[in-house]
Image: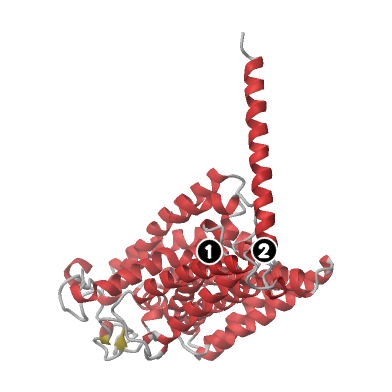
């Protein structure tokens, strides 16, 4: 909804093919594209974990084999289908998720192994209550998580592929608003599945004890709940839909990263005279390389949530400040982006991440041990890093512009050629202003011809 309200016109008015084209226009090729490629790998890992976890539950395969099989299938049919596989499977994905999840929910709620979820919401039964509490001393962390979820996704390349394919501003805005509403609708079954799982006596099921949470299998709770708490035919429908949906997201991530490299790095930087046939093979090779890289990273952790949060975290603290500055601050340039990127990346790494077992070297106010004994930042440090990165981009872009425009440094040191770019921008503004005046004059003349 935020993107539909504020960013859509700024993005579509330049008739660009993707979010990263903004960084190309601003002479920020390498920094922006590397950031996007690094951001895309955790997203792919999360999808592979989801698919591998589903296969592991259904087929009772070892985790490694499940990941390898799902990766091979995704790479092969992305190579064979290309953009058509992404376009058509996305439509099928939405239909399958919506229908299958809502079909499975009544069977989950009425299964004989679970209590009424309204009774277990605030009461300790088989497990802890599924409705948690927010403590006042954790308000900073909750605010940081909220901002991360609200703004982190605005810098995802896959999102802009959908928005920029719209034929008009209105259609792009309607797509954003409809997507936001549809996310709320699809979130209801997920909440109910988690509530049922927390209200279940797992000792009375074939799954047994300890519970999925105690076995550290909470990330696979959807296929586990469908397999052990619903009839066979229902679980087949639900798990099949989950597998299809995850596979669809995986091919989108593969093709997005491969297209980003082939179009913006290989075509624009490495080999500008590459033919269409050559580019097709570059995309195919890129799909394989990106797929293998994502598969290798998947073995580092078995949690979908970990990889998803790492991807969104990188998007929020590193990519989002760059996107905002390119869209709304015309003075931003490559020097500011480099400083903002380095500053955001270094501060984020030094701030630590409990999900990855990375201890914080920088302790913000309120940093302390959480309930699990992990040293955690309870200050909104991600938002602070994002703001510091954004300010540094604007500040150092302004300083670089002053240095080169005033002749304090020779033009041969201007690696991003911002002096010539600023001159072109000023010329383009003058031409646009002149065209606007001519259009206004012509409109007045045309209006006068209709008067009696």
Q: Nearer the viewer, mark 1 or mark 2?
A: 2
Residue 82 picture location, percent across and down: 70, 67
Quadrant of the image occupied by residue 183: bottom left
Q: Identify the residue at the far left of this view.
A: 123
Front-most of residues 399 and 382: 399
**Identity of the residue drawn at 67% across and 27% down:** 442
Which quadrant would the C terminus be assigned to in this image?
top right
Q: Residue 323 carries which label?
A: 1
Q: Distance between the residues labelled 1 and 2?
A: 22 Å
**Identity of the residue drawn at 48% across and 84% down:** 56
Residue 362 picture location, percent across and down: 36, 87
Query: Which numbered disc flags the more N-terminal residue, 1 or 2?
Result: 1
**SS at circle 1:** helix
**SS at circle 2:** helix
Question: Which residue carries the number 2 mark?
Answer: 419
Front-most of residues 106 and 13: 13
Quadrant of the image occupied by residue 87: bottom right
Query: Does the image show residue 404?
Result: yes
**Identity of the residue drawn at 37% across and 78% down:** 221
């Amino acid at each position: 909804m935020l993107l539909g309200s504020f960013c859509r016109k700024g993005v579509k008015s330049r008739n660009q093919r993707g979010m990263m084209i903004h960084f190309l226009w601003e002479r920020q090729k390498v920094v922006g594209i590397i950031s996007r490629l690094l951001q895309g790998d955790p997203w792919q890992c999360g999808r592979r974990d989801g698919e591998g976890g589903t296969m592991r539950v259904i087929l009772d395969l070892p985790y490694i084999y499940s990941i390898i099989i799902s990766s091979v299938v995704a790479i092969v049919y992305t190579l064979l289908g290309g953009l058509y596989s992404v376009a058509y499977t996305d439509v099928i994905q939405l239909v399958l998720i919506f229908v299958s999840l809502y079909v499975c929910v009544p069977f989950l709620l009425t299964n004989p192994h679970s209590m009424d979820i309204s009774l277990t919401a605030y009461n300790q039964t088989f497990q802890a209550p599924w409705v948690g509490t927010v403590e006042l001393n954790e308000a900073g962390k909750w605010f940081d998580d909220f901002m991360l979820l609200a703004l982190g996704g605005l810098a995802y390349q896959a999102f802009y592929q959908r928005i920029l394919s719209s034929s008009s501003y209105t259609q792009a805005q309607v797509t954003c608003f409809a997507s936001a509403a549809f996310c709320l609708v699809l979130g209801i079954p997920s909440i109910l599945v988690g509530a049922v799982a927390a209200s279940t006596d797992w000792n009375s099921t074939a799954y047994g004890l300890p519970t999925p949470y105690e076995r550290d299998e909470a990330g696979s709770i959807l296929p586990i709940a469908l397999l052990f708490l619903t009839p066979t035919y229902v679980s087949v429908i639900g798990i099949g839909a989950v597998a299809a949906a995850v596979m669809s997201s995986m091919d989108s991530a593969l093709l997005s990263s491969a297209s980003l490299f082939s179009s913006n790095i290989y075509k624009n930087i490495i080999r500008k005279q590459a033919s269409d046939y050559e580019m097709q093979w570059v995309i195919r090779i890129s799909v394989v390389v990106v797929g293998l890289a994502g598969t290798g990273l998947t073995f580092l952790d078995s949690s979908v949530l970990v990889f998803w949060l790492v991807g969104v975290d990188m998007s929020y603290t590193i990519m989002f400040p760059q996107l905002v500055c390119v869209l709304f601050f015309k003075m931003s340039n490559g020097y500011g982006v480099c400083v903002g990127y380095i500053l955001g990346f270094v501060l984020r790494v030094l701030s630590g991440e409990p999900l990855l077992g990375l201890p914080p070297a920088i302790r913000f106010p309120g940093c302390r041990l959480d309930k699990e004994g992990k040293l955690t930042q309870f200050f909104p440090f991600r938002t602070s890093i994002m703001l510091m990165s954004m300010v540094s981009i604007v500040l150092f872009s302004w300083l670089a512009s002053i240095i080169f425009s005033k002749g304090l440094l020779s033009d041969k040191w201007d690696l991003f050629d911002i002096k010539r770019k600023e001159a072109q921008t000023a010329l383009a503004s003058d031409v646009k202003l002149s065209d606007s005046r001519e259009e206004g004059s012509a409109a007045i003349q045309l209006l006068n011809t209709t008067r009696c």
